[in-house]
């Protein structure tokens, strides 16, 4: 069942059901919150506290919720600002219950530069958490020894990110200028030889997934749905920097401890990872016949938005 088929009434009834059966409390007030692309998110006020309940109708989503909980446990153990997950289950739809952290979303923080710098600092701390393999399933393996995982970085690049296939897809859709596809393949070939220890990545470190308190301090990092295990820095940086202004990019990197020389050395790798991340989105646009949107992405890949070159 797709999440779109759950009616508003069904969702509210299910939220109150989860509160009653899992938390053993009656919901005094239920409010819809802005969710992600796939999840429905509700704030539920109880007599003694307020919680967030995330719902998805896809049965496979429970496994993702469990992975999020495990990643957040690892982050909390490292004293990172992460909400406590109270429960994950399916009765019948997958749900996650977590504490409601008071504050404002990072997109509304009064000191955007300061917030982004803190995000960089937190991301660097996340990357100190070592994992036993590469890819999303390595997070399962961190707590479940029998869980499958990619044992090599190269296997992760092809098995999880489908790197060679996605470069071919970009070439087929005309996203590359002449010779760019070959350059990407050369970068990929070099990256595949790396021997670096895998670490935890948030996977979507953006302002919308940050809660800031009244003093401007980040008090929660939310939405670990895309968490994964990768080599240090590059995956999270390629995603986090994508939406930021130039000044914010600089602040994030300074918070992380990344200098100009490191950026120059690694920018080709980050561009490749960013491209791989967006292939499914662009392919879906092309399949839906959204030619104008595809053309805008083609302009991005051509570097037309880069005013410094």
Image (cartoon, rainbow, N blue to C red):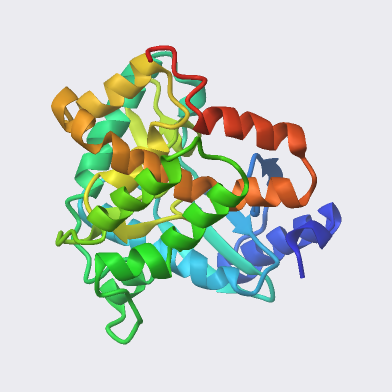
Q: Residue at x 36, y 19 (%)?
A: 248
User: In the image, is residue 248 above or below residue 221?
Assistant: above
Q: Is residue 188 left or right of residue 88?
A: left
Q: Residue at x 37, y 17 (%)?
A: 246
The foreground one among 266 and 130 is 266
The foreground one among 115 and 130 is 130
Where is residue 27? Give x, y as percent: 67, 53
| Residue 41 at least partly seen | no
Snapshot quadrant of residue 293: top right
User: In the image, is residue 20 above or below residue 272?
Assistant: below
Q: Is residue 193 left or right of residue 84?
A: left
Where is residue 104? Give x, y as percent: 49, 27
Residue furthest to the bottom in view is: 146
Snapshot quadrant of residue 121: top left
* Quarter in which the N terminus is drawn: bottom right
Where is residue 175? Give x, y as percent: 56, 40
User: In the image, is residue 165 above or below residue 262?
Assistant: below
Q: Is residue 157 left or right of residue 14?
A: left
Where is residue 243? Give x, y as percent: 47, 29
User: In the image, is residue 85 above or below residue 233?
Assistant: below
């Amino acid at each position: 069942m797709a999440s779109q088929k759950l009616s508003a009434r069904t969702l509210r009834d299910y939220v109150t059901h989860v509160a009653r059966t899992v938390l053993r409390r009656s919901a005094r007030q239920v409010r819809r919150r802005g969710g992600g692309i796939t999840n429905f998110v509700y704030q539920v006020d109880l007599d003694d506290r307020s919680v967030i309940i995330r719902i998805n109708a896809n049965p496979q989503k429970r496994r993702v919720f469990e992975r999020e909980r495990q990643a957040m446990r690892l982050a909390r153990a490292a004293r990172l600002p992460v909400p406590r997950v109270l429960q994950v289950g399916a009765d019948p739809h997958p749900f996650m219950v977590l504490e409601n952290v008071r504050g404002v979303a990072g997109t509304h923080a009064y000191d955007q530069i300061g917030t982004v710098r803190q995000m960089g600092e937190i991301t660097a701390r996340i990357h100190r958490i070592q994992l036993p393999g590469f890819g999303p399933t390595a997070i399962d393996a961190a707590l479940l020894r029998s869980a499958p995982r990619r044992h090599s970085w190269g296997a992760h690049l092809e098995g999880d990110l489908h790197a060679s296939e996605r470069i071919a897809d970009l070439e087929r859709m005309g996203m590359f200028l002449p010779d760019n596809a070959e350059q990407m393949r050369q970068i990929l070939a070099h990256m595949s030889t790396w021997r670096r220890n895998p670490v935890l990545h948030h996977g979507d470190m953006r302002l919308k997934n940050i809660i800031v308190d009244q003093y401007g301090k980040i008090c929660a990092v939310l939405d670990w749905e895309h968490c994964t295990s990768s080599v240090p820095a590059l995956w999270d940086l390629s995603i986090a920097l994508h939406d930021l202004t130039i000044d914010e990019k600089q602040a994030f990197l300074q918070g992380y401890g990344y200098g100009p020389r490191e950026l120059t050395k690694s920018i080709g790798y980050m561009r490749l990872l960013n491209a791989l991340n967006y292939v499914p989105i662009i392919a879906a646009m092309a399949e839906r016949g959204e030619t104008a949107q595809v053309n805008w992405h083609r302009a991005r890949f051509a570097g037309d938005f880069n005013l410094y070159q």
